[in-house]
Image: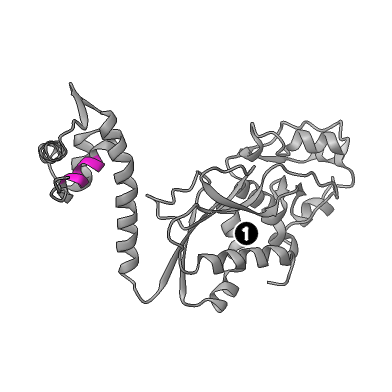
Amino acid sequence: MKPRHPAPLNALRAFEAAARHLSFQAAAAELFVTPAAISHQVKRLEAHLGVTLFHRGHRVVELSEQGAALAASLGEVFAQLDLALDRATAPGAAHLRVSTLESFAAKWLAPRLHRFHRDCPELKLRIETGNDPADFVRGGIDIAIRYGPGGYTDVVAERLMDAPVFPVCAPALAHDGPHPLRTPDDLRHHTLLHDDSATDRPGVPDWPAWLHAAGAKRVDATHGPVFDSIYLAQEAATAGHGIALGVAPLVEEDLQRGRLVRPFGLTLPNAYALWVVRPDGGRPHPGADAFCEWLKAEASVGNSEK
């Protein structure tokens, strides 16, 4: 087979950006060149490969079959290259990027991180928040901690903690005022704080499910504000604005510190749990195993002193 000259790197960069955006103009803005320069580089790559990468229309481009296949591979290649370059800027220290939901980062991870830094001071952590599927390639994420049902595909996922659910509120709301919380029906005098975590998610307890299990028939399960995150609902409860359904690992710290209390003992199991998710295969990250082992050790301690 006749050897092929190396593919032009600038042309590959231009094509990958254009394929990702499906726009020469957007690719040009990303790479700080003109759309004409992007078009020229793509044509150069097509000539080099001898294939058509884009079907061009009036103000629109679509990937050909060959273009789509090449774009998928290049996206991974450039993401790995960018990540390697980022890590090369600090060769004396290992960096680990961890993605997790905001409530877990604030309420569980942050109060414990000093112990990890004490044991592994050479490992530099970057904590990012979100609950979308982690992008281990383009996003450069090394470890993700997710609240979900499991069954994740094309990754390695390990159950970290169960997440049972029960009501929580500020101490003064539970014990003081004209309507202390003695029975579940007393909730009718208080504001219920809702969050979207149980919306359209079978097996994730919400207020109607908890009130039904508690036999509370005089409480309107739908009244009260709705927050778009567990974190916000639990923060509102801590501030004394109502009663939230607490997810056990996420309220552990506030319960221990006395910022929240459990007015009732009834706990409902949760189909969702907290999972540690890592890329399947690829080069092992230095320190990732140590961080995952530390997470599991902390999770097994439970309500230990911080």
Residue that mark 1 sits on: 107
Tally the marks. Answer: 1
Residue at 29% across, 63% down: 85
Is residue 198 one of those drawn in magenta?
A: no
Residue 218 found in image quarter: top right
Residue at 75% across, 37% down: 207
Q: Which is nearer the eye, 86 or 196?
A: 86
Q: Position of residue 58 (x, y in %)?
A: 17, 21
Q: Which amino acid lies under the numbered mark 1 shown in the image of this protein?
A: Lys
Query: Is residue 119 left or right of 203 when viewed as pictured?
Result: left
Q: Where does the C terminus fall, quadrant-wise?
A: bottom right
User: Where does the magenta region start and end?
Assistant: 11-17
Q: Which is nearer the eye, 57 or 211?
A: 57
User: What colour-coding does the image apply?
Assistant: one colour
Query: Is residue 189 left or right of 130 when viewed as pictured?
Result: right
Residue at 62% across, 59% down: 107
Residue at 50% across, 49% down: 130
Q: Where does the N terminus fall, quadrant-wise?
A: top left
| Residue 182, placed above or below residue 304 | above
Q: Position of residue 235 (x, y in %)?
A: 63, 52
Q: Position of residue 126 (x, y in %)?
A: 45, 63
